[in-house]
Image (tube, helix red, strand yellow):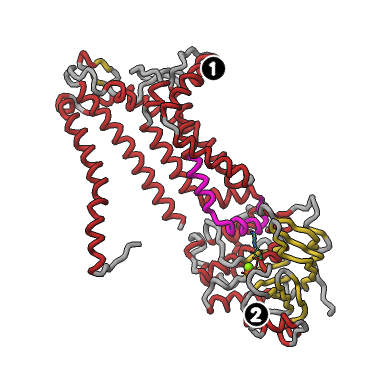
Amino acid sequence: MNQTSRLRVENLNVFYGQNHVLKNISLSLPDNRITVIIGPSGCGKTTLLRSLNRLLDEQEGVRVEGRVFLDGQDIYQPGVDITLVRKRMGLLSQKPQVLPMSIYDNVAFGPRLLGLRDRRHLDDLVEKYLRLAGLWEEVKGRLQEPASRLSIGQQQRLCLARGLAVEPEVILGDEPTSALDPQSSRNVETQLLNLKENYTIVLVTHILRQARRLADYVAFLYFGELIEFGPASEVLISPRDSRTRAYITGEIS
Amino acid sequence: MSIQRLSRRDRGPELATAPFAFFPVALAGAIFLALLIKAWPLLSLKSLSSLIFSSTWLPSRGHFGLWPFILGTIWVTISAFVLAVPVAILTSLYLSEYAPARVKRIFQPILDLLAGLPSVIYGMWGVLIVVPLVSKYLAPFFGRQSSGYSILAASLVLALMILPTIISVSVEVLNSVPLALKEAALSLGATRFEVIRYVVMKKSFPGMLAACVLGLSRAFGETIAVLMVVGNVPAIPRSLFSPAYPLPALLANNYGEMMSIPGYESALNLAALLLLVIVVGFSLLARWYLVRISRRSS
Ligand SMILES: Nc1ncnc2c1ncn2[C@@H]1O[C@H](COP(=O)(O)OP(=O)(O)OP(=O)(O)O)[C@@H](O)[C@H]1O
Ligand SMILES: [Mg+2]
């Protein structure tokens, strides 16, 4: 495997109070590939994803041990500017979370935080990223409308565009299609496949077929442990561990 | 959303409950009408505008100018509002966005307790603490003389009274902003302050405004605590350190006494009517504005 990884997890342990939910996870997420995290409900997929951009330690009562490296820098080191770390990773959540403002302002939100004010430049960025997320044609005539008026599927692609507009290197998605109808899901999946040549993508899903469609690499989590990680062709077709096999054949879910 | 077609069996409960829905409406109408009828003798003698805008209040000579009382109400209420709102917003932002769970747990019951205290307690506290504070420290500091019984004292007491209500409701509004939405903004690289400023505040604005309006409505009508510290002098107030005589205090102090003076009862009823119109008018305005902004943002 000759794969570079700018995002690496080393001996990660996470506790919610006394509850030990991630157990000594080590994982290198390959660049320009889609890595899909699968596993039964409650096994810690969301927790792992949220540890990657440090949303996890926004909460009270969460303890994180271990290290997460982004381009060689441990993002859990004290003194690291979390906002800069987060700008390098876009996040798609389960339900699309559009900001309470216009479609245009949603996409311009990140660039504006970075201090960009020039209207012409912002216009270009908004168009560029809406195109990249496959939404431009549908919304180009109504950019000033509140984003909440879009359909859920459109909202999720808007969230994608908004995340791309901060020019991240990594895209994180926590079951980003679970609230969407099949057509919109396909649409988001297509965008993700198109994007992977330029981004490192990490997706959580509990839909095995989606994993098969998207994954280059698969990580299987079970009760907080990383049971298996490898190329999709190996993990999903001929898994080494009996628990992985049980999961992908549907014996445990 | 209302249920469009009710089956026949469902009509019964509807018929049984509907009259109770009309009851409050009917009551409001009845109050308005009663006040209007009682105020009519005076209104038929003098023009409404001469009663509202005249500053001479000499009931024994038949002068019933309500302007000092109207101004007193507005001064006291608006000052209380201006004092309370910034404090309430900052407190509720702290409580919902920054405070550790421990602090929240302590704060909530205290707020409920404060919101439920009888207003006469606030009034006594005002007489004991706020009035001397104004006469001995605040007024001299601004180079004024004041007995302490003043608009400032009343609005400080009133601000304190409406604070718990505004804070509780605002905290609830702020807490209803989904965590996932805040996280979405955080993950775009916003700082926590930026999230509050551009997302939380924006999302909560209508609700916070409603909280403030709730406080303001309470302030307009608050009677006892205010009349204990406001001085009750029927003159046009000239500064925050002047005494004043808001409408509710006028009514509470005088209704039922000196009713033999011709026109006096009528004048007090007109005062009550004006208070009602101010409060209702204000609430309607606020509601209209709320509907307008919530329609625009969704
Ligand atoms: N905020 C929290 N406080 C306490 N425990 C939590 C919290 N969030 C998650 N947990 C617990 O941590 C474990 C892992 O949760 P997580 O959300 O990461 O699972 P998941 O794999 O994403 O599940 P799902 O497929 O249902 O989304 C679960 O046992 C859950 O109950
Ligand atoms: Mg999850």
Callout 1, which amino acid?
Answer: Phe
Q: Position of residue B216 (x, y in %)?
A: 41, 36
Q: Are marks 1 and 2 in contact (CB under 8 Å)?
A: no
Q: Is residue B296 visible?
A: yes
Instruction: Examine the structure image and report whether residue A171 is included in the region drawn in magenta.
Output: no
Real-space CA distance between mark 1 and mark 2, rounded to the nearest whole angstrom? 76 Å
Callout 2, which amino acid?
Answer: Ile
Where are the magenta residues, as a range?
B166-191
Q: Chain of mark 1?
A: B
Q: Quadrant of the C terminus of chain B?
A: bottom left
Q: Which residue is mark 2?
A: A252
Query: B278 or B165: nearer the eye?
Result: B165
Apparent side of residue B129 relative to residue A91 in the rendered image (left or right): left
Q: Chain of mark 2?
A: A
Q: Residue at x 36, y 41 (%)?
A: B283
Disc 2 secondary structure class? loop
Q: Position of residue A61 (x, y in %)?
A: 68, 53
Circle 1 Cα neighbour tier, 10 Å, few/some/many (<14 / 14–19 / ≥20) = few
Q: Residue at x 31, y 25 (%)?
A: B252
Apparent side of residue B53 relative to residue A93 in the rendered image (left or right): left
Number of the label disc, if any, that sits on residue B142:
1
Quarter of the rendered structure image containing ligand 2: bottom right
For residue B102, which quarter of the picture? top right
**Where B294 falls versus B210 (above or below)?**
below
Instruction: Examine the structure image and report whether residue B180 is included in the region drawn in magenta.
Output: yes
Q: Position of residue A249 (x, y in %)?
A: 66, 85
Circle 2 Cα neighbour tier, 10 Å, few/some/many (<14 / 14–19 / ≥20) = few
